[in-house]
Image (cartoon, grey):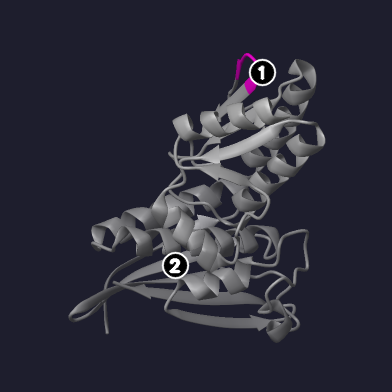
Amino acid sequence: MIARSSGSVAVRIEQDVVLARQAVRKLAQDCGMRLIDQTKLVTAVSELARNTVVYGGGGDMDWEVLDEAPRTGIRLTFRDEGPGIADIKLALTDGWTSGGGLGLGLTGAKRLVDDFELDSTPGVGTRISITKWS
Amino acid sequence: MERIPILRMGDFLLVTIQVDMHDQLAMTLQDDLAERISSTSAKAVLIDISALDMVDSFIGRMISSISGLSSIMDAETVVVGMQPAVAITLVELGLTLQGVSTALNVERGMQLLHKRMADK
């Protein structure tokens, strides 16, 4: 697997969620990803970037365009140095929320992508990687 | 402050969302609509989301809230123009927008609202 290109987008405030969505939409379009997959990926980005801002206290989204002939993929990693997730299993339960949301952010994002990895240490931060192949 | 315009046409309020909304903008729209339904005694609200290329759980929740809110304030709501890719993604995300009336386009949405008002 070769990273064709990579970069990073700051995800600090609410407006950055919109910028992260737009950046990923552009990447997905440039990769020739189907519209439905673009929409799923961008929606997952919206959920995870919001979590980074709201729960993580802000962080970054790293992006990579992957070449694994014949397919192309986009891998995104959301990093924050927030309070972390104490119970990952609980956090990945549909309908469970620590805030005032619907509890669909993490689980929903997981369903919308091909790969989903979550690492979190209480007091250190959270790192979530997602990949969508086209 | 940035706002989504709400147009009044007789007993109807029309909202066309044409920008990529951040969360605060969605919350403001919800508050503004409640205020306008009250101040204009509107009987129906039509929300056109055909320009939205993504609806996440936050925007989905806002749509449900607006629908519930206007119902309590004796106004009908219909959401029109959802793009197919957005609809598929919403269902996969786990949001089915229960209790929200939808129509394929503005014309059908208007027909639906007129019919509901006539039936009342």
Distance between the alpha carbons at the discs numbered 1 and 2: 48 Å
Instruction: Pick the residue in front: A122 or A26.
Output: A26
Query: Magenta segment range?
Result: B8-12
Residue nearest the viewer, comparing B45 with A113: B45
Q: Is residue B102 left or right of residue A131?
A: right
Image depth: mark 1 or mark 2 in front: 1
- B81 vs A96, left or right, is left
Residue type marked 1: Asp
Q: Residue furthest front?
A: B119
Which one is in front, B82 or A101?
A: B82
Q: Is residue A74 above or below residue B5?
A: below
Query: Tag on residue A88?
Result: none
In percent of the image, x 74 and y 35: which residue is there? B70
Could one spot residue B3 in this view of the protein?
Answer: no
Residue A26 point in image, percent of width and height:
33, 53
Residue that mark 1 sits on: B11
Q: Amino acid at mark 2?
A: Asp
Left of A10 or right of it: where is B65? right
Q: Are marks 1 and 2 on the same chain?
A: no
- x and y percentages locating residue A82 in the rendered image: 69, 69
Q: In the rendered image of this protein, does residue B64 appear above or below residue A105?
A: above
Quarter residue B76 falls in: top right
Q: Which mark is residue A62?
A: 2
> Is residue B10 found inside the magenta-colored segment of the image?
yes
Of all chains, the one bearing label 1 is: B
For mark 1, does the 10 Å Cα neighbourhood hold few (<14), some (14 to 19), or many (20 or more) residues?
some
* Location of the N terminus of chain A (image quadrant): bottom left
| Element assignment for label 2 | strand
Q: Which quadrant would the C terminus of chain A be assigned to in this image?
A: bottom left
Residue at image location 57% in from the left, 76% down from the top: A127
Q: Position of residue B41 (x, y in %)?
A: 76, 19
| Residue B23 pos. (x, y %) | 63, 46
